[in-house]
C-alpha cells in the first residue's frame, strides 16, 4: 500500500510538472517558433519525423516514458501539424 501511494504521488508530481512546463511553453511560444524553424529549413516531413523519433529514442534512455510523453507532446505537436501530418 505504501509503495502504491509513492508511485501515485510520483505520477502526480510528473503530471504537475508537465502542466507547468506546458503553460511555460504556451507563454513563450517556443513550440510555434520551433515549428516555423523546422518548416523553414525546407526539409520534407519524413526527415523531420526521423529527427523527432531520434529525439524520443535518445531522451527515452534517460527519462521515464510517461514523463517524456507529457513533456514532449507540447513541443512536438505543433511541429507535426505544421509539416502536414494528420495530428490524430
Image (cartoon, helix red, strand yellow):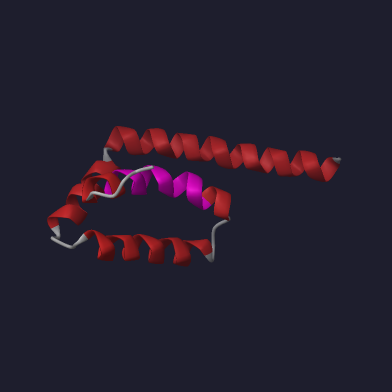
Residue at (31% x, 45% y) in the render: 86
Q: Which image quadrant is residue 51 in?
A: bottom left
Relative height, residue 76 to residue 54 (above, below) = above
Residue 9 shown left or right of residue 13 in the figure: right
Q: Of 52 and 5, which appears nearest the observer?
A: 52
Q: Of 54 and 63, which appears nearest the observer?
A: 54
Residue 65 shown left or right of residue 21 in the figure: right
Q: Is residue 70 magenta?
A: yes
Residue at (84% x, 41% y) in the render: 2
Identify the image quadrant of the C terminus.
Answer: top left
Provide the major secondary structure of the magenta segment: helix
Q: Which image quadrant is residue 56 in?
A: bottom left
Residue 17 shown left or right of residue 36 in the figure: right
Relative height, residue 48 to residue 67 (above, below) = below
Residue 63 at x, y = what percent? 54, 58
Q: Is residue 75 magenta?
A: yes
Q: Which image quadrant is residue 4 in?
A: top right
Residue 20 at x, y = what percent? 46, 35
Report the label total.
Answer: 0
Residue 41 at x, y = what percent? 14, 60
Identify the image quadrant of the N terminus.
Answer: top right
Residue 83 at x, y = what percent? 22, 51
Which residues make up the magenta segment?
A: 68-79
Residue at (13% x, 60% y) in the render: 42
Amino acid at each position: 500500500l505504501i509503495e502504491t501511494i509513492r508511485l501515485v504521488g510520483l505520477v502526480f508530481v510528473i503530471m504537475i510538472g508537465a502542466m507547468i512546463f506546458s503553460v511555460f511553453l504556451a507563454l513563450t511560444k517556443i513550440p510555434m517558433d520551433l515549428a516555423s524553424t523546422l518548416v523553414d529549413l525546407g526539409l520534407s516531413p519524413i526527415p523531420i519525423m526521423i529527427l523527432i523519433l531520434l529525439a524520443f529514442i535518445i531522451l527515452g534512455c534517460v527519462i521515464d516514458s510517461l514523463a517524456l510523453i507529457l513533456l514532449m507532446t507540447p513541443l512536438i505537436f505543433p511541429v507535426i501539424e505544421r509539416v502536414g501530418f494528420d495530428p490524430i
